[in-house]
Amino acid sequence: MKQKFDIIESTCVPLPLENVDTDQIIPARFLKATTRDEKFFGDNLFRDWRYAADGSPKADFVLNDPHYGGCILVAGKNFGSGSSREHAAWAIAGYGFRVVISSFFADIHKNTELNNFVLPVVVSEDFLKELFDSIAADPSMRVRVDVPAQTVTNLATGRSESFELNAYKKYCLTHALDDIDYLLEQKDKIEEFERNRQ
Amino acid sequence: MNTLFDKIWDAHVVSLIEDGPTQLYIDRLYCHEVTSPQAFDGLRERGIGCLRPQQIFCMPDHNTPTHDQDKPIEDPVSKAQVDALARNAAEFGLTHYGMLSPDNGIIHVVGPEKGLSLPGMTIVCGDSHTSTHGAVGAVAFGIGTSEVEMVLASQCILQQKPKSMSIRIEGTLGPGVTAKDVALYLMMKLTTSGATGYFVEYRGSAVRALSMEGRLTLCNLSIEMGARGGFVAPDETTFAYLKGREYAPKGEAWDKAVDAWKTLQSGEDAVFDKELVFDAADIRPMITYGTNPGMGMPIDGSIPLDAAPKALAYMNFQAGQKLLGHPVDYVFLGACTNGRIEDFRAFASLVKGRRKADGVTAWLVPGSWAVKHQIEEEGLDRVLAEAGFEVRQPGCSACLAMNDDKIPAGKYAVSTSNRNFEGRQGPGSRTLLASPLTAAAAAVTGVVTDPRTLL
């Protein structure tokens, strides 16, 4: 959903696993929807880790643990690998996450998050490890993500890092504009390109 | 600098956004039923159409049943998705190869087969295995649904230019070692994130010696190393494969096209951001033991002692265990990875004169109707039938189990597909990725078997 980004301060949900693939974020059997109902996808986020086959919640999975909550997901490196399904980003957004922090994102998934107004924040391995430790020590600790300043701060330790976000995408996120809005204004340039390559 | 990737990419740059992405022109967009409906909804919400409908080709593949395709799809949700694609294609004036059309099949099999994917093109689809089309010498990559909407609306996409990587494989592959084994070997070496951020050019004598089908398999799996795409520079093998195909240029236009395609090579002075070299002689038939495609090993090896415990628990394997002789319940031949004619020839060559093992359920699913018809023309269906195997109707099938072809929980499947993620082939399914030859060896013995012992 298009929404403006500014400063986000929230508790975190930790998922200290590496190589979380998009088949785990949203299994293929949930890809049959023909609409973009974020609630449906959000309800099935991490479905097979979150629920047993009979639909009962698995108590040991973090989304079922009442100690953890907030709109920031913190995940191990290589988050979102595998299938390009944008449904994974819809599920993350639909669940209510606005930011995902990891030390490394798979390419396609990083783009699909950005295109759905979920901000992927890449931090150093060291920062990530300390953040997992802080959350483990105190699940109520908070993280501050300042989009205009491009900084992320672990408020438990005060440690801060800057993160990358190109000026174009930053403008889009802070003004709730998407790439299609931009491309639709470029029709003259596209036609000129087509003429020139004839 | 001056790599083939640079040449193709740079020739498609419409504009550069300052401190932002590149606006890249797209020659070909493919749409399947799973990742496109919300993009078409987006067009309707914005009240716009497709800018270049003649450059867009649609076909259902993920949900299609692999038997009785002439009857309505039983699962109403699958049917709704397949129907939505037909409706959207008609509404927006796009070419659509419906389920029973002789043109239908898995997008990544059909595109090259029809000559829709050509050297020097930029090609995208809402599917990570779009990298497959790189085999014809194109820059092809998977995109998300928002990006599908971008291309539908503007024939352009906004992308950061990836870095370039050269993977050179020199020497000769041994008997029983296929393009699939090369790819599984690369994933074992690089892991599933080793090429993230890169576009890969596959080079070297072992790559040059691969058939077009082999190159399609190799490029298909680029995404499993994290790479956005991978390609092979076009050469005589490419031209011979494309000549005469439906959408390939004809007559004088063909000669002109080939002259232009011959210039699609990385320069002698090309500088890649990363260069890797491997020796073909080091590669043995491969199999995976874990829950991502990078968790592979030579088929006669043992599971690494430092293998991820969560993956081993899911697969019910132990570190240090050998897989040779391990019972196999299912065998799946097919998918955009290994659903082409050469894959069926390889499978048939090994099972010829043998019998399917009792207790093994085998699903042989061609990648397209064209492949199915060629199987019949070559008489491979009879060879397979004599050995106890049935050839089904085309589609993605058990690769991701969106249709009825699901591996039951706890069962072991030797699959020629591309992903062994938890639950990928059905909830609780356990996948061992391998080549068509290794799949055939498992199918006739009922256990994990080194195909070289049966050649």
Image (spheres, rainbow, N blue to C red):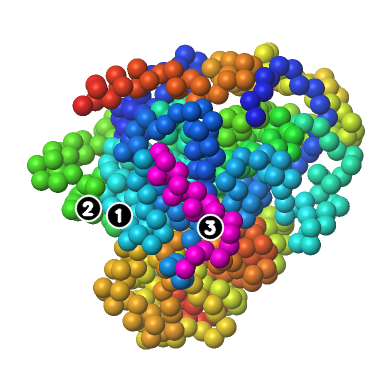
Q: Nearer the viewer, residue A50 or B310?
A: A50
Residue B74 in percent (x, y) is at 56, 65
Q: Which residue is mark 3?
A: B79
Query: Would you say the residues marked 2 and 3 are in contact, meaning their CB atoms lie under 8 Å apart?
Result: no
Front disc: 2 or 3: 3
Residue A70 in percent (x, y) is at 81, 32
Q: Which residue is mark 1?
A: B113
Q: CA distance from mark 2 to mark 3?
A: 31 Å
Chain ID, mark 2: B
- Magenta stretch: give its range: B71-92
**Residue type pointed to by label 3:** Lys
Q: Main secondary structure of the magenta part?
A: helix
| Quadrant position of residue B323 | bottom right
Q: Secondary structure at mark 1?
A: helix
Q: Are marks 1 and 2 on the same chain?
A: yes
Quadrant location of the C terminus of chain B? bottom left
| Quadrant position of residue B256 | top left
How crowded pointer 1 is (Cα within 10 Å; few <14, some 14-19, many 20+) is rated as: many
Position of A4 compared to B164: left or right? right
Q: Nearer the viewer, residue A62 or B143?
A: B143
**Residue type pointed to by label 1:** Glu
Residue B130 in percent (x, y) is at 43, 46
Query: Would you say the residues marked 1 and 2 are in contact, meaning their CB atoms lie under 8 Å apart?
Result: yes
Q: Which residue is mark 2?
A: B245
Q: Nearer the viewer, residue B189 or A194?
A: A194
Front disc: 1 or 3: 3
Magenta span includes A128: no
| Quadrant position of residue B330 | bottom right
Chain ID, mark 3: B
Magenta span includes B82: yes
Q: CA distance from mark 1 to mark 3?
A: 26 Å
